[in-house]
Image (tube, grey):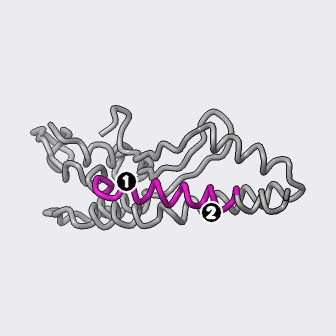
Amino acid sequence: MAAGGPPFELTVTHEGLDALVRAIRQEADGKALRKELAANMRTALRPGAARAKSSIMAMGSSGTGTGPGLRAGVAKKIRPEVKLGGRWSGARVKAFKTPALRRFPNAPKRLNRRGGGWRTLTYGHEPWRTQIGKPGWFDDSFTNDAAAYRAAVHEAMEDMARRLAARAG
């Protein structure tokens, strides 16, 4: 797992993606083309996001509380993300923070952590206890299929590049 937390990132060559975005900006309907490229890249990553969601939903539960469900709350926050241009360009599947979920904004990261877990009070009172989630639920969802997701994102980029080349030629 990356030191920064659970986002799974695909390293698409920034030079190629930046060149493609520059070419799209030169077109008259560049905004629509950028939206279409981003949508195609997100579509390429949706199976990975679905796999991560099913992985967290498969985590065991022993709680009988009446609060919002931890697993379902984390699963709702898993989404493919695409940014074209700016400081960061690329595509990734990210588990966003969950601030409204039992005052536990770092739930995705803590549930994924391979050691230690997190400390919490028992029913809001002493004694403190250590809880352990499902270590690796997010990272392991992408271990075997990272090359397939990378290839799908590259294919979306190449499709757009072919369309732009056909317009120019």
Q: Is mark 2 on a helix, strand or loop?
A: helix
* Kind of residue at badge 1: Ala
- Kindly identify the residue that appears in the image at 15 percent across and 47 percent down: 132
* Horizontal and vertical percent position of residue 111: 25, 48
* Kind of residue at badge 2: Ala
Range drawn in magenta: 141-161
* Horizontal and vertical percent position of residue 14: 59, 38
Task: Tell whether 53 sits left or right of 149.
Answer: left
Pick whichever of labels 1 and 2 is earlier in the sequence: 2
Task: Tell whether 145 sits left or right of 96.
Answer: left
Residue that badge 1 annotates: 146
- Kindly identify the residue that appears in the image at 71 percent across and 60 percent down: 162
Residue density around tag 2, few if under 14, some if 14–19, many if 20 or more, within 10 Å: some
* Horizontal and vertical percent position of residue 108: 33, 49
Quadrant for residue 37, please give it.
bottom right
- Kindly identify the residue that appears in the image at 73 percent across and 55 percent down: 34
Quadrant for residue 63, please give it.
bottom left
**Whole-Å distance between the Cαs marked 1 and 2?**
19 Å
The tag on residue 39 is 2
Q: On the rendered image, what quadrant is the C terminus found in?
A: bottom right
Q: Is 100 contained in the magenta span?
A: no
* Horizontal and vertical percent position of residue 68: 34, 63
Q: Is mark 1 on a helix, strand or loop?
A: helix
